[in-house]
Amino acid sequence: MPTRTARTGWNGSLEAGAGQVELTSSQLATYDVSFPKRTAETANGSTSPEELLAAAHSACYAMQLSAVLTAAGGTVEALDVQADVSIGADPAGGFMLTGILLTVRGEVTGLDSAAFLAAATEAKGGCPLSKALTGVEITLDAELVAEAA
């Protein structure tokens, strides 16, 4: 399996500095980052490690759930997955991830709501990023919004 690479160039102090995150492997984009924008309510044109992690986790979980649903006999018509990654104060000092909420809504043929929820829960445990993030509480909100005909 391949290794994927990203890099960050940073200039200045934590509070006054800024950087750029480059998606090196795909060469798709470079994004601005700064600590003040990372901890602000609005991002104002910058990304953050938490947003990048949320993007990665939502994509990873969608792939894993698609595989689990298919193995359970379902046909995935559509999945809408959102990951909300929260950061807060660490009682030991500094900051820490305080939780991840995975929200998924699905249209699946051949499975009922109970089977969808079981697959969603299984996928949460089997997703490689969920496995890597075992030190963070991951909450799941899953709903079969429409059983496709």
Image: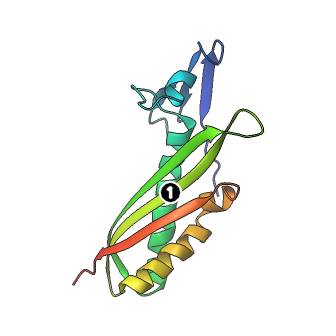
- Identify residue type, mark 1: Leu
Question: Callout 1: few (<14), some (14-19), or many (20+) C-alpha neighbours within 10 Å?
Answer: some
Q: Nearer the viewer, residue 10 or 16?
A: 16
Q: How many marks?
A: 1
Q: Residue furthest front?
A: 91
The residue positioned 47% from the left and 55% from the top of the image is 58
Q: Residue 74's quadrant in the figure?
A: bottom left
Q: Nearer the viewer, residue 131 or 117?
A: 117
Q: Which residue is mark 1?
A: 101
Residue 108 at x, y percent in the picture? 33, 78
The residue positioned 58% from the left and 65% from the top of the image is 127
Mark 1 lies on a secondary structure that is strand
Picture quarter with the C terminus: bottom left
Q: Residue furthest left?
A: 149
Residue 10 at x, y percent in the picture? 62, 19
In the drawing, does residue 89 fall left or right of residue 29?
A: right
Task: Tell me how the rendering is colored.
Answer: rainbow
Is residue 34 in view? no
Is residue 138 in view? yes
Residue 49 at x, y percent in the picture? 57, 37
Q: Residue 103's quadrant in the figure?
A: bottom left
The image shows residue 58, relative to residue 110, as above or below, that is above
In the drawing, does residue 14 fall left or right of residue 119?
A: right
The image shows residue 80, relative to residue 15, as above or below, that is below
Q: Nearer the viewer, residue 48 or 60?
A: 48
Q: Residue furthest right?
A: 92
Picture quarter with the N terminus: bottom right
The residue positioned 61% from the left and 70% from the top of the image is 125
Residue 32 at x, y percent in the picture? 48, 24
